[in-house]
Amino acid sequence: MPPVSAVLLAAGASARMGAPKALLPWQGEPLVRYQIASLVEGGVEEVVVVLGAGAAEVAPLVGGPGRLKVVVNPQWPAGKTTSLVAGLREVSPHASGVLVLAVDQPRPPEVLALLVDLHRRHSPLLLIPTYQGRRGHPPLFHARLLPDLLGVREEEKGLRAVVERYRQQTMEVPVDTPIVLVDINTPQEYHEARRRFGA
């Protein structure tokens, strides 16, 4: 069965947080390690971690199960799309799909496993989890969309442009947890998310 890969984006400056988000404690370990373990437990065979700001601090803590690649994106100040493209270039050519997850979007393995299983069984162009009708993260793209993903540009909505382009071919996946909507950018958001999901 062709593998599913993931690109884990951890290159941002964490300016609003005031500290590298990848290093925040989450369920007893740094968030970046939690995310890697969750992805692998969810059925992802390869995780490409993209670092940028604070790479020297974060890189020693990047580890875990499964096939793991680390990419340092020197162009990270130019925007998230540069990190996405840097990670996608390292994805295995044998991958059947790519799940794109930001390090500040903690997701439990059961949510990721549901997406991976539906990808393998139905092969839609795009899978997106939803909670009470609201679209969340992470998206899982079929490998056929790699050319579109590699062409994303910061000034043209980035990843959102691809999601909008294939809206009609997207399989929405309802889940029963609001964690698919969680995005941690500030200390207040972190403490609230940790209180609800990450203690």
Image (cartoon, helix red, strand yellow):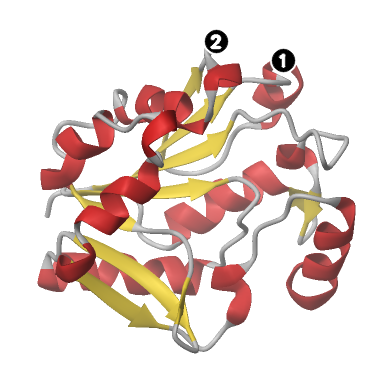
Quarter of the image with the N terminus is: bottom left
- Name the residue type under label 1: Ala
- Name the residue type under label 2: Pro
**Location of mark 1 (residue):** 56
Between discs 2 and 1, the one toward the N terminus: 1
Residue 74, compared with residue 47, is above or below; it is: above
From the top left corner, tell me how far across and down residue 167 is, in percent: 23, 65
In this view of the protein, which residue sits in the foreground, 31 or 15? 15
**Location of mark 2 (residue):** 74
Quarter of the image with the C terminus is: bottom right
Residue 5, by quadrant, is: top left
In the displayed structure, does residue 120 sit left or right of residue 185?
left
Inspect this view and state whether residue 45 appears: no
Residue at screen point 46% across, 72% down: 111
From the top left corner, tell me how far across and down residue 46 is, in percent: 35, 40
In this view of the protein, which residue sits in the foreground, 18 or 195? 18
Crowd rating for badge 1 (residues with CA inside 10 Å; few <14, some 14–19, many 20+): few
Secondary structure under the numbered disc 2 in the rendered image: loop
